[in-house]
Image (cartoon, helix red, strand yellow):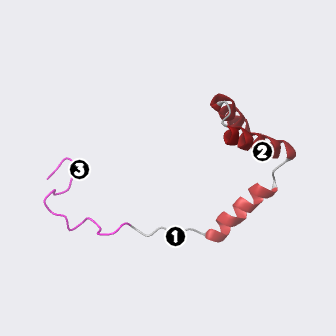
Amino acid sequence: MSVYGCNTGDYADIPHSPPEIKYNVKSCGASLEKKLLNIDRDTLLLGALIYLLLKDGGDMRLILALGYILL
């Protein structure tokens, strides 16, 4: 018997496949839709600025700081 309280030589208790995880897609979509519809002008402006800085190879510290503000 091992320290974990099971016999290490017997693998009959180990499941052969991982358990199936079911997601409620409708609730995930509704939550995402609510978040997307609640974007104000400031958030949209910061997002666009981050996109332009990433596209043009801007300063990474500035991009991370702007992303932190969006959180």
Image coords of residue 13 (percent x, y): 24, 66
Q: In the picture shown, does residue 47 fall above or below 21? A: above
At 16% from the left and 57% from the top, the residue drawn is 7
Residue 47 magenta? no
Which of the 4 quarters of the picture holds residue 71?
A: top right
Judging depth in this view, the residue of 1 and 10 nearest the camera is 10
**Marks 1 and 3, Cα distance to the nearest angstrom?**
30 Å
Q: Along the horizontal axis of the image, is 61 left or right of 33?
A: left
Q: Main secondary structure of the magenta part?
A: loop
Image coords of residue 25 (percent x, y): 62, 69
In the rendering, which numbered label is found on residue 4?
Answer: 3
**Marks 1 and 2, Cα distance to the nearest angstrom?**
35 Å
Disc 3, SS: loop
Sequence-first disc among 3 and 2: 3
Q: How crowded is mark 1: few (under 14 residues within 10 Å), some or many (20 or more)?
A: few
- Which residue in the structure is indicated by mark 2? 48
Sequence-first disc among 1 and 3: 3
* Chain part drawn in magenta: 1-18
Judging depth in this view, the residue of 1 and 43 nearest the camera is 43
- Which residue in the structure is indicated by mark 1? 22
Image coords of residue 24 (percent x, y): 60, 69
Q: In the picture shown, does residue 33 fall above or below 42? A: below
Disc 1, SS: loop
Sequence-first disc among 1 and 2: 1
Amino acid type assigned to the residue bearing label 3 in the image = Tyr
Tell me whether the residue at label 3 lies in contact with that at label 2, contact meaning CB atoms closer than 8 angstroms: no
Amino acid type assigned to the residue bearing label 1 in the image = Lys
Residue 13 magenta? yes
At 77% from the left and 44% from the top, the residue drawn is 48
Disc 2, SS: helix
